[in-house]
Image (spheres, grey):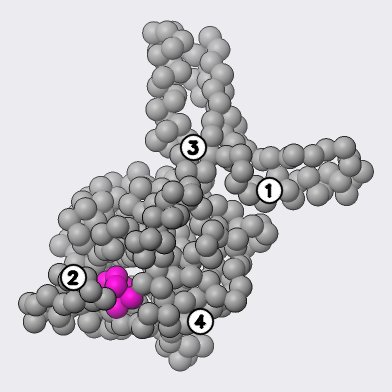
Amino acid sequence: MSFRVHVRVMPRGGLLDPQGQAVEHALAALGFAEAGGVRVGRAIELDVAATSRPEAEARVRQMCDKLLANPVTEDYLLEVEEA
Amino acid sequence: MLKVAVVRFPGSNCDFDALRAAERVGTNAYLVWHRDSSLQGADVVILPGGFSYGDYLRSGAIARFSPVLRAVSAHARAGGAVLGICNGFQILCEAGLLPGALMRNARLKFLSRPVRVRVEAPDTPFTRSYGRGEELTLPIAHGDGRYVADAQTAAELEANGQVVLRYVTDNPNGSMHDIAGVCNAGRNVVGIMPHPERRNAQLLGGQDGARVFLSLEARNATQHAGDMRAVDGRHLRV
């Protein structure tokens, strides 16, 4: 089976996110004063061949731990759907 | 003659500067391509600055998986000296050879200018020609130089004297504890954001960086004498 996996990598809460701050300031400058708490991360999508959904998720977690996210500075979320 | 391998990744751009700086102090310095699996018997390895793999994903994240990194890790684990400068520092952190990580500068801008740093740890292979507390002017050139580590790691770095260089008067990138460079617990792996290879001659505006490379030769001289040396109460095999 093939699964489409969506990985969302975000800067860890509590760490300074200067990109998020810059975007927030730009939004305020555009008149969107209601926007706050902006954080900028990264989205990665991939197809994974696996026999089950848990297997696909486990494999992508390994990919995240080894490469897709930095364990010191980032957290990630996975969403798995059947392709 | 001391053998110094300068590893070249696709996107390295300080490889020749590092090579020449090492040659200038009389070492046998040579380039090693990132796909090579051998360091050709190097005594010292330098990972130079640049933008390996275009900084894709995160600075240093892809270079970490270059074949040569297996040899660099083995060299480091055996106690061999490794210096990562700028992108090299980022690669060493990504590879887990140094603790922590380097994030986007606090004010986002890419910074290319001289900074003042203090030598906090003169007991590494790359700083032994400096005095403790000595202040230097060295150039930085980075967009991702904000050193971060979890609170426990940061406390350990301070307790073990693993902060090698610290920014003084002005912290350019928002790094924690004003950290500009760290070493591993074994003190043989060092990562620094400033570029000593760009400041090793009066012609380049100063030579505060020259002793990073002269330190290697100091190590070599002692090695030939074949003795043990006490540095700050530690007995180092040099």
Residue B137: image tag: 4
Label 1 crowd bin: few (<14), some (14–19), many (20+), radius 10 Å: some
| Disc 1 target residue | A19
Q: Amino acid at mark 3?
A: Ala
Q: CA distance from mark 3 to mark 1?
A: 17 Å
From the top left corner, tell me how far across and down residue B119 is, in percent.
42, 76
Question: On screen, A31 above or below B17?
Answer: above
Residue B76 in the image: x percent, y percent? 24, 56
Asked which secondary structure carries label 3, the reply is: loop
Corner quadrant of residue B52 = bottom left
In the picture of the structure, the residue carrying the numbered disc 2 is B236
Q: At numbered mark 4, what does the secondary structure look like: helix, strand or loop?
A: strand
> Which residue was labeled with disc 3?
A69
Q: Is residue B93 magenta?
A: no
Q: Are marks 2 and 1 on the same chain?
A: no
CA separation in Å, label 4 and label 2: 28 Å
Q: Determine the main secondary structure of the stretch shown in magenta.
A: loop
Residue found at the far right of this picture: A31
User: Is there a contact, CB below 8 Å, between mark 2 and mark 1?
Assistant: no
Mark 4 neighbour class, 10 Å CA radius: few under 14, some 14 to 19, many 20 or more: many
Per the rendered image, the range of residues in magenta is B122-128
Q: Which residue: 40% across, 14% down?
A: A55
Q: Quadrant of residue A37?
A: top right
Out of B138 and B11, give the one closest to the viewer: B138
- Please state the chain letter of the residue tagged with numbered disc 1 in the rendered image: A
